Amino acid sequence: MARPRAKRNKDLPPNLYRSGNNTWRYRHPLTGKYHGMGDDKTKAVNAARKLNDILTPATDLVSVVMGEITFGEFSQKFLTEKRRKDGRPLADNTVRSYSHSLNRCTEWENVALSSITLFMVNKLLESLPASTSIETRSLLIQIFDLAISKGLVTDNPAAQTIKRYRIKQRKRHTLEGLTAIRNVSPQWLKNAIDLAMLTTQRRIDIINMKWTDIQDGHLHVAQEKTTDDPEDEFELLEGAGYVRIKINDELQRVLDRCKDNVLSPYIIHRVPKGKTKNRGQTKDHWTQIEAQYVSREFLNASRAANAYPELNGRQLPSFHEIRALSIHLHKKAGKSAQTLAGHATERMTEVYASGHEIIWNDADVGIDLPFNAD
């Protein structure tokens, strides 16, 4: 419980304090920092009242009687109930990403949802690095949109903020650079690079491809991860794309190279060093490759090949950038990669409610591999 104010300060609004005999200071209720308010008491009192109206969350008796839900309660409910457009639960990586973003909002944990102001949201977002701010803003917009639909709030303060943009550091792959990386890669990574080049699919979709996804001469890809990353113009806003890729001779050759003496349900797979199949408890199968492992090994191969000697750190193109090079080569060959990549158009995959039909977008591979495949 807060200490009662001295008798001489009883007439002061909350957060306004004397800063000497003739000066005043205001304590920011969210940051705890003090700000000078000059020596005019009337002006200081008026300013403090205005600041309190803007900065202090509404925790009065009305909120208590109305039983308003707190931001912490509602955000956890959102995280538990959130589903993708096809009705499936969120991927584990997405849940972790959302949880990290919500951890940045801990100061709102016990604040009534309707008391979160535009000023509060702006303050939070501006305190974060650009990339983190973009992720957090996107999640907050979804949370408040849901709250509006349930009649809990009347507006979306996150949507009223201006989205920040980060300076892109990562460069695109060149054909020469990617060829050099591929030449020093282990066979499973060569296979993954080849599949990414031919199909334009993302890292997560490449490593999730299974032999059972091949039916009637087509490779079926239910795209798992889509974002609104401003660095990537090849992404959908949300949901999942369903692409059925016709297996031509070039793609068939890559698939044949993926077959080996290891019995795995996954097209891209590997035998972990020093581990047995009984220890892969966190995976669907002991030969499954994790997304972060793909990125790490690709980076190791890039450095081993010295593929981009003029680049360093975050400038080095990642496995994901193969997607951009593939789309570029498709366009250069006069082939559209739009349906193949699962982009948003009038022909965008239509996903119905549970129990209804999933409509697959048919697509053809438009290029051959631009390097000598082995």
Image: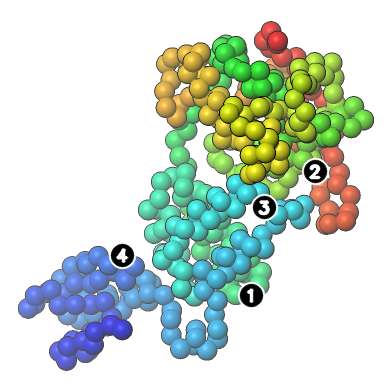
- The CA span between labels 3 and 4 is 34 Å
Residue beneath the point at 44% across and 45% down? 130
- The CA span between labels 4 and 1 is 30 Å
Q: Is residue 124 left or right of residue 85?
A: left
Judging by the rendered image, the residue that carries numbered circle 2 is: 349
Q: Nearer the viewer, residue 337 or 356?
A: 356
Assess whether mark 3 and mark 2 are in contact (beta carbons under 8 angstroms).
no
First along the sequence among labels 1 and 3: 3
- The CA span between labels 1 and 2 is 31 Å
Q: Could you tell me the amino acid type at mark 4?
A: Thr
**Residue 126, position as x, y percentages in the image:** 39, 53
Q: Nearer the viewer, residue 355 or 185?
A: 185
- The CA span between labels 4 and 2 is 46 Å
Q: How is the image coloured?
A: rainbow
Residue beneath the point at 84% across and 34% down? 212
Picture quadrant of residue 273:
top right
Judging by the rendered image, the residue that carries numbered circle 3 is: 90
